Image (tube, coloured by chain):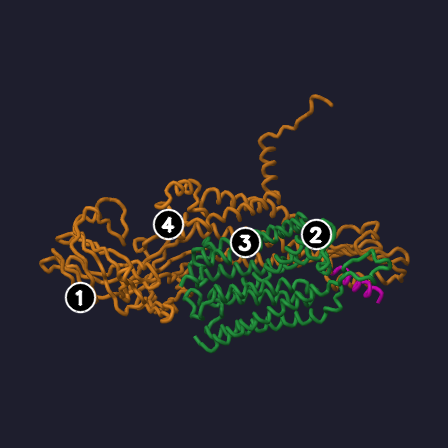
Amino acid sequence: MSSNVEVPELGLIGLARFAWRQLTSMRTALILLMMMGIGAIPGSLIPQRTSNPIAVRDFFENRPELARWYDRFSLFDVYSSPWFSAIYILLFISLIGCVLPRTVEHFHAMRAQPPLTPKNLSRMEWYENWEGSNSEIERAAQWFKKNRFRVRREAGSISAEKGYLRETGNLLFHLSLILILVGVSFGSLFGLRGEAIVNVGERFVNVPTSYDSLALGKLTTESDIPPFTIKVDEFVAVYDPKTNMPKDYTAYVTTSNNGVSKSEIMKVNSPLTFGSTRVYLQANGYSPIVTVKNEDGSVAFQGPVTFLPQDGNLRSIGSIKVPDAQVPVGFVSSFLPTYARTANQGGVSIYPELLDPRLLFSVWAGDLGLDSGIPQSVYRIDTTGMTNLGLGSLKIGETFNYPGGSITLEKVVPWINLQIVDDRGKGFALIGGVAAILGLLASLYGRRRRIWVRVTGAQVEVAGLSKNNAPGLEEEVKSLTTYMRG
Amino acid sequence: MNTTWAYISNYCIYSAMAIFALSFLSHAFETAWAVRAPQNSDTTDGTLLVRTLDYKRTERAARIATALMALGALLLLGGIVARGISNGHVPWGNMYEFSITGAFAFTAAYLAALRKYDLRWLGLFISFGVLLTLGTAITLLYRDSAPLVPALKSTWLVIHVSTAIICGGIFLLANIIAGAYLFLERYENAGARPVWALRIPSLDLLDQLSYRLIAFVFPLWTFSVIAGAIWAESAWGRYWGWDPKETWAFITWVAYAAYLHARVTVGWRGRRAAWLCIFAGSTFLFNYVYVNVWGTGKHTYSGLDQ
């Protein structure tokens, strides 16, 4: 063996080419696909910030050390984590690198003639020969034409091929997957997604400040938000008296868009549409309308306060904060649409409708911490350093007096949570999805096969070959030979 | 809600269980009785005493078993329809209803396949599986018929859930066949099959059969997931949100995609393909049981937490 073996130098381009080949091999694509499947698992077992922020907060409280480790690996945001993104970006680069060259190749193959008739036909999957007259080859040509085979005619032989649909379908399927990803990324770059709680009787104006939460697409600016308004006229919730489960939610709204005003109905499965923006009815709850007065009778606060539902019977919690009263007060409250008392839980709600509404609260005087700069929950009050002024319970119309003021429950209105979504990529994703199914069907059920006919003197030979061992070749060739024999 | 129809539905389901139990017994009888004890007449000198199979004498039992299976399926269908009438909507609102429909889809898939292949050897397992499903449904999962929650009020319920249930039935069938493959392969590697298993088709055919089922069901599963996405868009404002059920539907999809690739492109056959098939099927079962009962998210319609 020679000691100075020439090792080909890879160089930068060579290395890049090597990496590209590795990445775009089908083996790599499959491994990446499996990795994406496995990588999706933790997100279904560990609570996610996007879908269940409360559970994530509880997790941090209960097991802080583990939570910190989870967080280091983005396990609370699996689907937007760097490692998950890396998997699917690599997968789709791999897919593109795998599919695009095959598409070009397939395009050429479809326009090319079938290959030459091989010399030895008797070794094919199906072979038949007989002594015939001269008309067979013409009849074979007719049969191929009728059955839409692509043919190559040579002197004394025909090479025919059919079933390119299989590869077409296969490529269509994989290209559609790419289209779905394009749709998904388009949707995250453009458009918006946000939520807003609107009390019945109030108007939602589609500007950023109206939102409780708003996420704009990376390439969207606030000036792209279309200017429409939605006034919530009425909200009707129907519950099943036997199970207390909701049966129907309907919001009657008046919308105004481009100067056109009209009455519309929103339901859970039928959102409002404004161009590419859709508005969904997502959740509902109650807002007690309260009046808080100072000791001298002047009004310190009046209006609806949104309460957050805690269970199926809409027991809700909330806080009424009146920092501008002469005695700054906060009411740590819960609201019960249908009040009942139990021995171990205290006040509970036993039905989600307003049958016997009750506002329960404790009054706290002192610094509400609104100016401290620490972000606060609208629904909670940190009562450390505050003084308890008493406990109260109000029906509609009742007033509770405490040292330094009074609170009156005027009435209760429902609120609805609007989800406003502008997703301009979903059309692509839908087309991709439909095309993927069509491609799948073609690739799973398409059969690619070749049939040859050769006439040498009086000797007629017919042979057939099917790819992927698809069944049905036998019947097809028999039909051909029967036709050829006339 | 109509109580009379709810009772009719329950009676149908109970009767179906009784019929499936009888079918199970007939299948068991058929399987056992076909084994013929060694007889002196098998050989002239009496040394070659083997047990053989004789299906002629159990043909009647086999026919009765299949007829009972068909009757059970009809009763099940009747129970599902009556449940739907009682509910006033398609009966796919909670896990009890999913389970009885799934049991029906499973039986129907078997009966349909029976028209083309002689699969009666499977009947024993099918009737047992259906009994188990119905038993769990009636004892653990039963809920009174109830109106649908608003999010479920959509045409897509019919499309998305029915296809998902059909897919579930076929996944399960493919899994049983793959399981039979693995079970028999061990015997064949060690020597020969046990006598009662002789009539089960060749390993090759079992392998083909589970592949065919998956090739048939994979586009349907893709459709079911996409139909779900379209529905999610109109109900929840996003077509894909990595909800636990969506995540596991995706995992199942990936697993079956891997199966098809492994088979068609890499050429996996036999044992490895069967294991992959069973793995993919179990992701579906996990999704059905775990996410419905213990999971969180928007797809928890088991109705068990009430």
The Cα–Cα distance between marks 3 and 2, rounded to whole angstroms, is 27 Å
Q: Which mark is residue A221?
A: 4
The Cα–Cα distance between marks 1 and 2, rounded to whole angstroms, is 81 Å
Mark 3 and mark 2 lie on one chain; the one further toward the N terminus is: 2
Q: Is residue A342 left or right of residue B238?
A: left
User: Does the magenta portion include A480?
Assistant: yes
Q: Which mark is residue B187?
A: 2
Chain letter for mark 4, please: A
**Which color was chain A given?**
orange
Q: Which residue is mark 3?
A: B283
How crowded is the residue under tag 4: few (<14 C-alpha within 10 Å), some, or many (20+)? Answer: few
Chain letter for mark 2, please: B
The Cα–Cα distance between marks 3 and 4, rounded to whole angstroms, is 42 Å
Residue stretch in magenta: A472-486
Disc nearest the viewer among 3 and 2: 2
Give B24 or A208, whichever is nearer the viewer.
Answer: B24
Disc nearest the viewer among 3 and 4: 3
Residue at horizontal 20%, vertical 64%? Answer: A394
Q: Are marks 3 and 2 in contact (CB under 8 Å)?
A: no
Q: Are marks 3 and 2 on the same chain?
A: yes
Quadrant where the N terminus of chain B is found in the figure? bottom left
Amino acid type, label 1: Glu
Residue at horizontal 82%, vertical 63%? Answer: A481
Instruction: Report whether residue B167 is seen.
Output: yes
